[in-house]
Image (tube, rainbow, N blue to C red):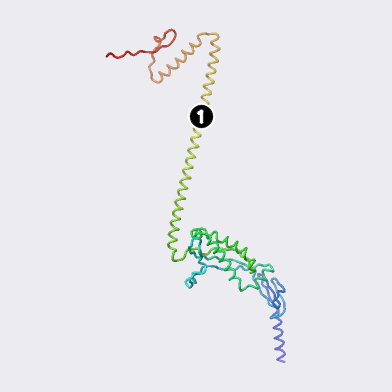
Amino acid sequence: MRLRYLLLLGVLTYLLTGVYQVAPEERAVVRRFGAVVSRPGPGLGVGLPWSIDRVDRVPVRTVRQLRVGYDADTANDMTTPVGQLLTGDQNLVNVQIVLDYAIGEADADLDDYVIHRELVDATLSRAAEAAAGEWVAGRTVDQVLLTGTGTLPAWVMDRLTERLPELRLGIRVQRVSVALIAPPDEVRAAFEAVTQAQTAVRTKEFQAQQERDQRRRQAEALKYRLEQEASEYRDTQRRQADADATEFLAQLSAYRDVRATNPDALAFLWWDEMRKTMVLMKTRGGKVRALDHHLQNGELNITEFIPLPKR
């Protein structure tokens, strides 16, 4: 009887291996004799016992992080450290990037991930290193160091998006970032000195551009002020000229009207202008002398002959 109970307990235990639980953030892939038969979601599932059904739980809601490239802890143990890449101008740089990826929830992604689970990190690392190597090899060391942090992640992301479907890993890369991009330790001091010099040059260029812009603004302000003053002066002179022309035309019209009845109108205008001239000369401190003795035949003749010196 004891043997029967033990046998019954063993059979019951074996049958219970067909019961499985899938967490809320998981999907399961059930394979029967190696062939996928179902992909149940979260909850309690029942299948055939162990060795007949195999249940692989896949954490589809979990974001995994993978560091790819240079690792300072292991670099000293290698002749050519992983992640030490050659630039287009034959210089070495140490590059380490960080990949955030998750498993796809589509049926094909689940199947691919379950089949290649052990190869995912290694294959993804090689693909990312190859993409980073392509980017570094096509640029100078200065371009890599100056623009790598901002440009390299987008390049790697685009290349992985193109190549991962062919690898059938069942994953989706969500984010790429640069953790390290620097020259080797042996030449870091020299690169830092060059970087400082380049920074000083850019600072001087920026200051020169600021001064140029300031002087340009000042010149434009001066130009605007001069244009305004010239415009005001032009308008003033034009108004004065218009007023003088109007006054002259009025006087001419009055003279023509008076001349028709008074033949001495021109003489009257002459003496009126002479009066104004003399008043102006007195106002300015000048001396006014009568010129009547210079009148000859109704005309003013002030020509004087200076006697020649005697020899």
The percent coordinates of residue 183 (x first, y second) are 47, 63
Element type where label 1 sits in the image: helix
Left or right: 230 with respect to 33?
A: left
The percent coordinates of residue 309 (x first, y second) are 29, 14
The percent coordinates of residue 177 (x first, y second) are 55, 63
Left or right: 123 with respect to 52?
A: left
Left or right: 11 with respect to 128?
A: right
Q: Residues within 10 Å of mark 1 (few under 14, many from 20)?
A: few
The percent coordinates of residue 252 (x first, y second) are 53, 16
- Name which residue lies at 51% across and 24% down: 241
Q: Quadrant of the N terminus?
A: bottom right
The residue where tag 1 is placed is 234
Hey, which quadrant is residue 24 in on the image? bottom right
Q: Is residue 208 above or below residue 265?
A: below
Three-letter amino acid code of the residue under disc 1: Arg
Q: Nearer the viewer, residue 54 or 137?
A: 137
Q: Is residue 55 above or below residue 259?
A: below
